[in-house]
Image: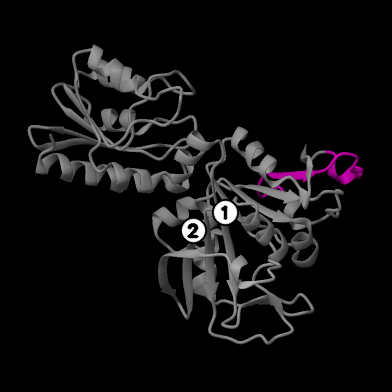
Amino acid sequence: MFSPLDTRMMARALQLARRGRFRAAPNPHVGCVLVREGAVIGEGTTQPAGGHHAEVEALAMAGDARGATAYVTLEPCSHHGKTGPCAEALIAAGVVRVVAAMEDPNPRVAGGGLSKLREAGIAVDCGLLQSEAEEVIPGFIARMRRGRGRVRAKLAMSLDGRTAMASGESQWITGPAARQDVQRLRAASCAIVTGVGTVLADNCSLTVRREQLDASSLAQEAGQRQPLRVVLDSALQTPAGANILSADAPTLLCHTAGAGVESHLLPVDRAELPVAATGMDLSALMSLLATRQCNEILVESGPRLAGAMLQAGLLDELIVYMAPVLMGSSANPLLHLPLDSMAQKVALKVVDVRQVGSDWRFTLAPE
């Protein structure tokens, strides 16, 4: 079904799709390449929310796309949102063939765009480099298929598995390169979740710091969109003047019923969550974030919340930065995870290991 040219052009479309990972949310980042007589005539990447989708960007670059083949990493949309349907734009432009890497998991599309193209007499092929395309937008796919986005916990530890001294002192376990890498993680996230304990102990900001990103245009672009900061604060204890309340990024305070609201918190976005057996209902939190179109969720917290997320089965990945230092047996552990026997141990699959500056980054997935 697919020629070497098809594969090469879809690989290029996937490169373009990856460029949108810092700016396209809540839309999936998609790439599109227009080809006529073996030559590329247009390329596009999904623009920030409300802007053009990849197909429209590619059509604008081409000017005249009559007789062209469109290679897209995700099925062209068929519904009206903030922009018009991309399927209709391709039809109007006179494209004669569309090759899609995968169907859109969004129930509002789910094959509708491909059907509309076929009904217009356009040749349609789907499934080229599908697994690679799915790896580009895992959070969007997760939100569409299971009702919550991809959840990853970022953790930093010493060689002996410690995250902070008994006094709470934790800055800095890892080096500058690892901290820069964390900024890219934040930039690719829709929401960053923490607990009020971390807010009180560290007075964290949880913003993307452009000055800590590398000098490439793509990384600098990452700092133009700030993720939603989510604080689990059952009794609404976040103090006035806390960095997490700054105007640098949006903030959502999640609390339980009956929490008193101090005057300084009245302007802040708040949401009530139910209580589960071990505290605030974390599954309800993920459902809430899904309604806010959060595809990629990063947990940056202390060991208790991170451990609760893992025990609740809500973590898709753990990203652990390990520094070549020893912090001693009295320091705090990586996770609060009370286990009594080897039979209770949590098995993790190693997804990736790489050196980041003087530290090591482990990407792990619960089995």
Residue under the image location 80 percent in, 62 percent down = 200
66 horizontally vs 203: left or right? left
Give me the disc on residue 367: 2
The percent coordinates of residue 260 (x first, y second) are 92, 43
Residue type of the residue flagged with mark 2? Glu
Give me the disc on residue 315: 1
Nearer to the camera, 126 or 243? 126
Residue under the image location 28 percent in, 37 percent down = 101
190 horizontally vs 91: left or right? right
Give me the disc on residue 175: none
The percent coordinates of residue 35 (x first, y second) are 16, 34
Q: Main secondary structure of the magenta part?
A: loop
Question: What crowding class fits label 1: few (fewer than 14 Cα within 10 Å), some (14-19), or many (20 or more)?
Answer: many
Q: Nearer the viewer, mark 2 or mark 1?
A: 2
- What's the CA distance linking mark 2 and mark 1? 11 Å
Quadrant of the drawing holding the N terminus: top left
Residue under the image location 49 percent in, 29 percent down = 50
Residue 254 counted in the magenta span: yes
Nearer to the camera, 298 or 229? 298
Decide if residue 26 is in sight here: no
Residue type of the residue flagged with mark 1? Leu
Give the extent of the magenta segment.
246-266
The percent coordinates of residue 158 (x first, y second) are 59, 80
* Position of 127 relative to 208 (above/below): above
Residue 302 counted in the magenta span: no
> Which SS class for mark 2?
loop
